Image (cartoon, coloured by chain):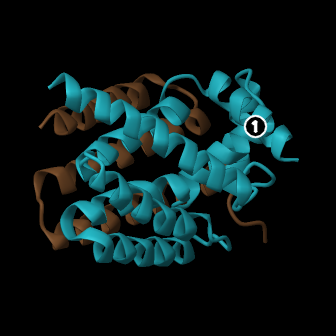
Amino acid sequence: MLGEILHILAAAIISWILFVTVDIFFRLPEAGGVSGASAIARDIEAGGGALAGGTMMGNIVCSPDASAGTLLAACGVYVAGIPGGLAAAALVFIGNRICHDPGYAGTTGAVLATFVVYASTLVGFSATDFIAGMVIAILTIQGLSHTHASRLLARLWRVRQ
Amino acid sequence: MIALYIVAGVAVFAAIRVIVERNTGRKLPYANVLNFAVAGTIVLLLNHPLALVAAAAYFVGSTLEANAVASTYAGGMKR
């Protein structure tokens, strides 16, 4: 039981690094993809957060990004192995187009996560660890403190620039 | 099994924060966490390829709703 909890925490850290890296690589903190993302960013900034981090959080809300790609890829690997993960990537791609998102962060994240999750299953992890891990990872960004999360993302964005 | 409890617990936590938060712009990221947790729960409860399709359909649909709510909140389309 303790081992499974440690696996989930490790999976959360891996998922966090994966999705934040892909999102920042695809310049999500730069500009809101839709007007709603910018509105969320302004509200987070008004609450004491950083605008760039808020913009990335707004973009995560408004379209399936690498975090959604990681979650659905982990779900896909759980139900059907690598083909399931790639099917999840295709579904994320369709989701991006439906949500008026011109980018490829979600699809790229899903494809990368498919191989990361599958490789992890070969060294003792299970795909369910990554499903729970990704939910914990998104909780740390979107669900605990918008002020601190947006400042952290803005700091990482400055490093990227 | 622990994974399911964690994901369901996060869903309940996010749902409470959605209700408690007053500002619409700051409410939506909590709703996003809720959507992640519910999509994860669907697959953890039903280990079947169609569960992936159901989770993706739920997730994309709810993300589109959040997108619509946020864009309306931002002032909607300028004509």
Query: Nearest the camera: A55 or A109?
Result: A109
Image coordinates for residue B57, horizontal then vertical, percent: 32, 68
Q: Give the residue at x 56% y 42%.
A: A17
A90 vs B75, left or right, is left
Query: Nearest the camera: B72 or B46?
Result: B46
For the N terminus of chain A, the quadrant is top left
Quarter of the image holding residue A119? Answer: bottom left
Residue B14 visible in the current orientation: yes
Quarter of the image holding residue A90? Answer: bottom left
Chain A, chosen colour in render = cyan
Tell me the crowding category of disc 1: few under 14, some 14 to 19, or many 20 or more residues within 10 angstroms, Cα based.
some
Q: Give the residue at x 25% y 67%.
A: B52
Chain B, chosen colour in render = brown
Image coordinates for residue A48, horizontal then vertical, percent: 74, 21
Looking at numbered disc 1 in the image, what kind of residue is underneath it?
A: Leu
Whether B75 is drawn above or below A73: the answer is: above
Q: Give the residue at x 31% y 47%.
A: A131
Tag 1, which secondary structure? Answer: helix
Whether B74 is drawn above or below A157: the answer is: below
Query: Which residue is labeled 1 in the image?
Result: A156
**Given the image, what chain letter belongs to the residue carrying mark 1?**
A
Q: Give the residue at x 37% y 63%.
A: A73
Whether A149 is drawn above or below A103: the answer is: above
Residue B69 visible in the current orientation: no
Across the whole image, how many numbered discs are drawn on residues? Answer: 1
